[in-house]
Image (cartoon, rainbow, N blue to C red):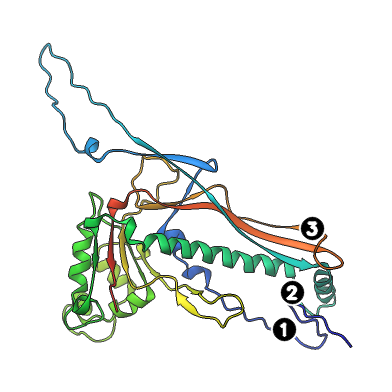
Amino acid sequence: MSTVNRPFPVSATLTAISIGYRNPAHTLIGTRALPGVEVLDENFKWTEFPLSEGFTVPELEVGRKGQVNQVEFTGEEKTSSVKDYGLDDAIPQSDIEAARRARAEKRSNFDPENQATEGLTNLVQLGREVRAASVVQNPDNYDAARKIVLAGTDRFDDFENSDPYGVIDEGMDKTLIYRPNHIIMGQPAWSKVKRHPKLIKAVKGGLTEDGAITKAQFAELFEIPVENFLVGVAQVNLARKGQAANLARVWGKSIQLLYLDPSKKQADGSVITWGMTAELGSRIAGSIEDKDIGLLGGRRVRVGERVRELVVAKSVGYLIQNAVS
């Protein structure tokens, strides 16, 4: 008797327990590291204003019959466009019908279209996480004077010689005008930083250097809200299709200090923020009939979004590269 391989069991006597390995949604930090802002078209513009105009005070005194001094505000208009990201999953009609019968007979609650939508959404979210991490960790997205590369005993996993508080605190003072209100690092860095004796002493008043500090204590030490301390723990498979899984951290060993303004909702120049994700509409999800799937046709499930990750004010960010070995 032939059998048909389906993405779900149809046994009348067995209850299926599905275990899917994926990054939990609450662990993804990309949408907070590059907050979304609304754009109204595929192509959009924003204006960058010269630094000098906001800080150069012209002659203000006016003579009794003199003319009031005039100033002119200028700006450089920049253009970008969203990119389309999406995935499909083709589901044969025979799978859909078999799942429907199993649900009607109370043997299963599996719905292949719902399952496909959930799986595709997970991958689309992971893709956005990878892109955000790439932008945030890219040294080219920081001014030359606002990044540092640690080496040797300066790295934070050298508990005896390194000084994470001094390096981070100095970086917090080096951004232009706006002090960073977000600290971002990957789990590899946080696992070392939280156990650094000097930070433990700073938090606990020198009473001990054992154990570890919490995220809340770290955030308080650097005077930022705890919700603005982001630790990236997501993993992604680097192996090619057909090869054994080779999982790696999406967020690496660097630390980023960024000023991000959550009030920025549109891509204009009225609010300063280090980076953003331009979003055209919301994420889409749905299914359509596809007569070319198998003999009986089927449904094609699609999930996608139209976005673009951007750095718009690199001077309000600071990068600590190679924070740990």
Q: Looking at the image, is 288 positioned above or below residue 235?
A: above
Of the image marks 2 and 3, the number of the one nearer the N terminus:
2
Name the image quarter holding residue 121.
bottom right
Separation of residues labelled 1 and 3 (CA atoms): 28 Å
Secondary structure beneath label 2 = loop
The residue identified by callout 2 is: 110
Compared with residue 150, is residue 38 higher up or lower down, i.e. above or below? above
How far from the left and from the top, in percent, is residue 162?
19, 77
Q: What is the distance, in whole Å, between disc 1 and disc 2 at their CAs?
A: 9 Å
Q: Is residue 215 above or below residue 292?
A: below
Q: Can you see residue 224?
A: yes
Few, some or many C-alpha atoms within 10 Å of disc 1 (few <14, some 14-19, many ≥20)? some
Residue tagged by mark 3? 289
Tell me the amino acid under the disc marked 3: Glu
> In the drawing, what numbered circle is on residue 41?
none
Quarter of the figure with the N terminus? bottom right
Whether residue 194 is visible here, answered yes or no, is no
Identify residue type, mark 1: Ala
Q: Residue 16 carries which label?
A: 1
Q: In which quarter of the image is residue 103?
A: bottom right
- Please report whichever mark, 1 or 2, sits nearer to the chain's N-terminal start: 1
- Residue 53 percent across, percent down from the top left: 24, 35
Kindly give the residue lying farthest to the top in the view shown. Answer: 65
Q: Residue at the location (21% across, 84% down)?
A: 209
